[in-house]
Image (tube, rainbow, N blue to C red):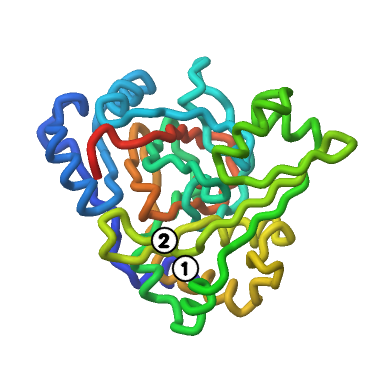
Amino acid sequence: MNKKTHFISTSIVKEINNSDNVSILELDQEEIISLFKANGILLFRGFDVDVDIFKEFTNLLSIDFINYAGGAFSRRVINGDETLLSVNDFKSEIKLHGEMYYQKNIPLMLWFFCANPPLEDGETTVCDGRQFFNEISSSTKELFSKKKLKFNVRISQEDWQKKYQTDDLNQLEEMCRKNNTHLTVNEDQSILLEYISPAIIPSRCGKYKVFINSLLPTKQLNPKILNFEDDSEIPEEVVSEMNEIAEKITTEISWQKGDILMIDNTRILHGRRSFADDQKDIYIRLCSPAFSF
Ligand SMILES: [Fe+2]
């Protein structure tokens, strides 16, 4: 059976098409901002965009671009610019998540750019964390309100130096302190990191609750490092419930060359389907909006 027949949700993605054949740099920024605030996710399609125009366009609407120090995956720096990165370096599925929710300082906003689409599969998946919250059973909502998530990870010296892009323990301590992450340095210079994060957060306007976190990919790729803050295990049934909701409310985006995706990382979860070919080249920028939201 075609897996797509499972999707009953209408797309949450607001698409902005190049119907007037204009440069993406000439679009009305105020209109983009108001659509972004209302929808949390915009897809710009059909514009003539290369990587330089992508950077110029994103520079107009965003500030505080960050590199990926402390990030969970290996990403490739594009054209020597540390704020322009490839998505991660493997091809399997990544379940829905908020970006970098395993630390305190998250990028508030994400940009994706399709330099080259995959031959097939490899869709980016998205869903609205407000809708996700509404789908959760009341018993699980109660569980998440009582118990936060705890990430507990041991990293070898070689790996933390790569991940945090430094070999200086003082710099590492500083980064962990800023991220409310508890750091223990072992005798062999491996480290233990502990970070506590809520599974559900209030929306920026304060009116809604949003299920957004790193639970699903962590349980998929590295299950042992994630428990509740009291060290009790997150029950299998709860993880299954979250996976079922995720599939039910997912929207898939099939990439076209030059597509740009603008995402509110405080509200919209993203992930991707697996793919097999070597064509796919998607870039990401992590930042904050250059406007209040
Ligand atoms: Fe991600």
Q: Along the polypeptide, which appears first: circle 2 or circle 1?
A: 2
Mark 2 or mark 1, whichever is nearer to me? 2
Q: Position of residue 232 (x, y in %)?
A: 70, 72
Q: Secondary structure at mark 2?
A: strand
Mark 2 vs ligand 1: CB below 8 Å: no
Q: Looking at the rendered structure, which numbered label has been put on residue 247?
A: 1
Residue 214 drawn above or below residue 169:
below
In 3D space, how far apart are the residues under numbered discs 2 and 1 (Cα atoms)?
Answer: 21 Å
Determine which residue is flagged by label 2: 201
Q: Position of residue 235 (x, y in %)?
A: 65, 76
Residue in view at x 12 percent, y 33 percent: 28
Residue 136 found in image quarter: bottom left
Q: Secondary structure at mark 1?
A: helix
Residue 222 found in image quarter: bottom right
Nearer-the-camera pick, 42 or 149:
149
Q: Position of residue 137 (x, y in %)?
A: 45, 82
Residue in view at x 47 percent, y 29 percent: 66
| Amino acid carrying mark 1 in the image | Glu
